[in-house]
Amino acid sequence: MTYQVVLNFEDGVSRVISCDDAEKVTDAAFRHKINLPMDCRDGVCGTCKCKVGAGDYEMEFYLEDEAMTEEEEQEGYALLCQTTVSSDAVFNVMASSEACKTGAQQTAGEVIAAEKLSETSFNLRVKLEKPLGFLPGQYVNVSVPGTEETRSYSFSSKPGTDEATFLIRNLEGGVMSSYLAERASAGDKVELTGPMGIFYLREMKRPQLWLAGGTGLAPFLSMLEKVAEEGTDQPITLYYAVTRAADLVELERVEQLAEKIGTVTVVTILAAEDEEHALKGYVTDHLSEKDMNDGDVDVYLCGPPPMVDAVSKHFKTLGTEPAQFFYEKFNPSESKAEAA
């Protein structure tokens, strides 16, 4: 049997490789022309040590206290030259992609459609030359047709298909926004570089609290697609906060996925004072100790920096820190995560 193994490098680059039954991860990586740090291949030097992010695996011989300590193994470290997998898995490599003589993948694609969802957002659909593996929540750099520019966006689609979608914030004068609003046409050529980023869905071992601000909903759409495919017994609470009701784009899709999963509660919040809505204000106005589940909760947050900072402070006000807190900030600018 063949499994999908994600290698996350220190510089944020991710590579997805296939790994066969009984095949060492280092051998699988070498087969994909990725030179993971490795000196001995025998479990005695510790050069290929990494942190396991997810998945079922077995590790054979290693020289204790020299290659790796027993405490490190208990903390989830593994020697990839001695490791085989029995499920899809994620490994965090303690080296840059450049040091491993690899880099972000480049995938060609063409525009299927660019749809204006509201005054504040677009949906971009891209047909890929080949299916692209990534972790739900990660982003890619997307070239802007007709320019030398690229912009970074989180996938809003599920991994492993030949169609990618992106929820993109409409920025006045923005390079990508101008393209989508004025001249986007089916068949336009684009290039995707990635995947990248450490904001991605981990194995769900406890209740989930997901916080989306505006087009920060994008990675959660990808996560919901993945969970809907695989199922979960864990409860998921998704707060979706925007300014106006018209900004609640993709809400029907969210609700359909939530119904399919069966353990998802969707909470929407509007900030505009002049609009009618059940919940008004900001996420921090409604997050309670109940949401924190006495700290036994994983929190994922994607939104602008003020939202991330406010939520972090709110946890301190509540007096409860989550078991795990992952976040992705994006700025309303022409920068890395202009629309998460």
Image: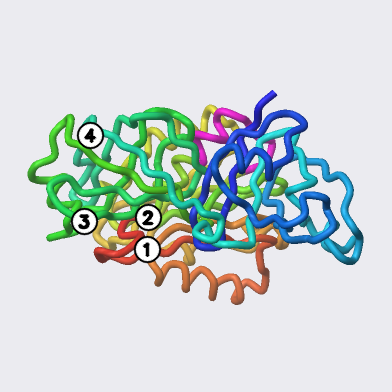
Question: Which of the marked residues, 2 or 3, is nearer the chain's N terminus?
Answer: 3
CA separation in Å, label 2 and label 4: 19 Å
Q: Which residue is mark 1?
A: 330
- Which three-letter amino acid code belongs to the residue tagged 2? Ala
Nearer-N-terminus badge (2/1):
1
Where does label 3 land, which residue? 149
Is 60 placed left or right of 101 in the picture?
A: right
Marks 2, 3: nearer the viewer: 3
Question: Relative to residue 28, is residue 275 drawn left or right?
Answer: left
Could you say which disc has been placed on residue 35 in the image? Answer: none
Q: Which mark is residue 340?
A: 2
* Residue picked out by circle 4: 111
Tell me if 187 is positioned left or right of 196 in this view: left
Mark 3 or mark 4: which comes first in sequence? 4
Please give the range of residues in magenta. 223-235
- Residue 287 seen from this side: no
Evaluate if marks 2 and 1 touch, with contact meaning CB atoms under 8 Å apart. Answer: yes
Task: Tally the numbered discs.
Answer: 4
Q: Residue drawn at (40%, 70%), measured in percent from left and top?
A: 305
Residue at 37% from the left image edge and 48% from the top image edge = 193
Q: Are marks 2 and 3 in contact (CB under 8 Å)?
A: no
Q: Nearer the viewer, residue 63 or 134?
A: 63
- Spatial distance from mark 3 to mark 4, Cα to Cα? 16 Å
**Residue 232 is inside the magenta segment:** yes
